[in-house]
Image (cartoon, rainbow, N blue to C red):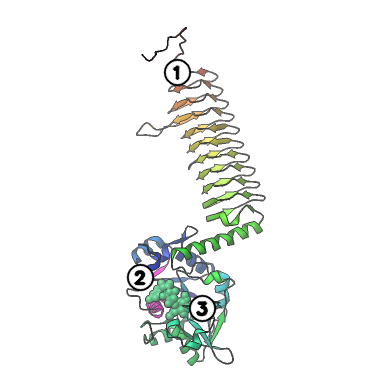
Amino acid sequence: MLDIVILAAGKGTRMRSNKPKVLHPIAGKPFVSHVIDRSREINADNINVVVGFGAEQVYEELDGQGLNFVEQIEQLGTGHAVQQALPFIREEAAVLILYGDVPLIESDTLRQLLSVVSETSMGLLTVTLANPLGYGRIVRNRIGSIEAIVEQKDASKEQLEINEINTGVMALKGKHLIKWLPQLSNNNAQGEYYLTDIIEMAVADGIEVRAAHPHHEAEVMGVNNRKQQAELERIYQARIAEKMMADGVSIIDPRRFDLRGSLTTGHDCLIDINCVFEGVVILGNNVTIGPNCVIRDSVIASNTIIKANSIIEGSKVSDGCVVGPFARLRPGTELLENVNVGNFVETKNSTIGKNTKANHLSYIGDSKVGEGVNFGAGCITCNYDGAEKHQTNIGDDVFIGSNSALVAPITIATGATIGAGSVITKGVEQGQLAINRARQENHDNWDRPRKK
Ligand code: UD1
Ligand code: CA
């Protein structure tokens, strides 16, 4: 039985934002959602989020996730914040207190902290910092047992020398919290109800306070401003990039890699610099992604090359395709095997058959294209009449001369040829040549107009 309380009521003044701090993202996901995800990983069945500033925005963003929201109308301190959640805390549960603005905490660390919670002990996550300025200090007695936490502003000169600090994360039995929280007072330098005062109550009740420590310092770093947000973003991305490289993916520069979602890879994939992956992206084996690509919610099969500066969204790319440079595959695109889509080609809601090539400056929308088709440079499917979208069907082995416009709805049958520069408004039958452009006139000895 595990109850979680996530403190998320603060405004985050230093973010200088209209949005509550905990809704700002790391890797495209709100800080607080990272904390919620970790809570689920350790099987919390009762997650309470204490909200205050911008509560409405927080509800809206986190709606439908089975969370219990508790409102702290005035922010009177961390102890007061946890008090608001007290009606939802179960005596027999272990209670874990987390901060919504400390996003990189790891579930392993939380498990370790929870493992020291018993009827006669509680857990406190502490870390030793070279510069402990601003944090609550961990006061230990002569034999090294934790006796109290003293806030920076309440600390004596000797206590300020202590380098072991309170990360704020703690775990204890519900019944202990239920007993101690109502006894907090705000008789201190900040006039706040300090959650940290329960440590002395624990000691007085003979409950041992046992420390656990994070694996990395970044796990317990809070975000107070946009600079720290950017720093944690890089740490988070570096962690993912490292894991992917360990799994056999080549990342040319892990400092210039960004994943905002999930990325699954086969063997021997290569990711060049400055790529952004969003949503759910799946790469097969031997996929190469050139520099500056953005890939969102797409599947890219084996032996495919995505060249520089391509944008791919909601698309499926089959084996052996070559896409880009500067290609844009929009949602509903499916490229079958060995398709080439080149520079300044945009596709949308279209299936493109095997071995088809559209190498330069084309738009293919709402189309079904057969195998072995050749789109010349600048070919356009005119799918939109200003009101409705219409379908284009192109059979196998069709050759479309450069700078042609196919006005949908239209069907071009197998083996047909379209002359360059044509505007095709009527269907073309199997094997026909269709050409629709002004016939060329040549005039002999043309007398050019001259300036007088
Ligand atoms: C707190 C700890 C300190 C610790 C530090 C770690 C206390 C008294 N002090 O100090 O020992 O070293 O965290 O970062 O607990 N919050 C609310 N409601 C409130 C007050 C705070 O929800 O009324 C939330 C904040 O939004 C934030 C978290 O609790 O997410 C911590 O609050 P903050 O004011 O940053 O605590 P510190 O003074 O830094
Ligand atoms: Ca803080």
| Nearest to viewer (mark 1 / mark 2) | 1
Q: Vertically, is 92 above or below 347? A: below
Find disc 2 in the rendering and name its residue: 52
Which of the two labelled residues, at mark 3 and mark 1, occupies the earlier sequence position?
Answer: 3
Question: Is residue 12 at all visible to an observer of this figure?
Answer: no
Residue farthest front in this picture: 452
Q: Label 3 amino acid? A: Pro
- Numbered mark located on residue 437 in the image: 1
Residue appearing at x 64%, y 49% in the figure? 269
Q: Which residues are magenta?
A: 65-91
Instruction: Give the CA separation, mark 3 to mark 1.
Output: 78 Å
* Label 3, residues with CA under 10 Å away: few <14, some 14-19, many ≥20: some
Residue at horizontal 56 percent and vertical 43 percent from the top: 308
How far from the left and from the top, in percent, is residue 379? 49, 28
Of residues 167 and 94, which is closer to you in this image?
167
Which tag is nearer the camera, tag 3 or tag 1? 3
Residue linked to disc 3: 132
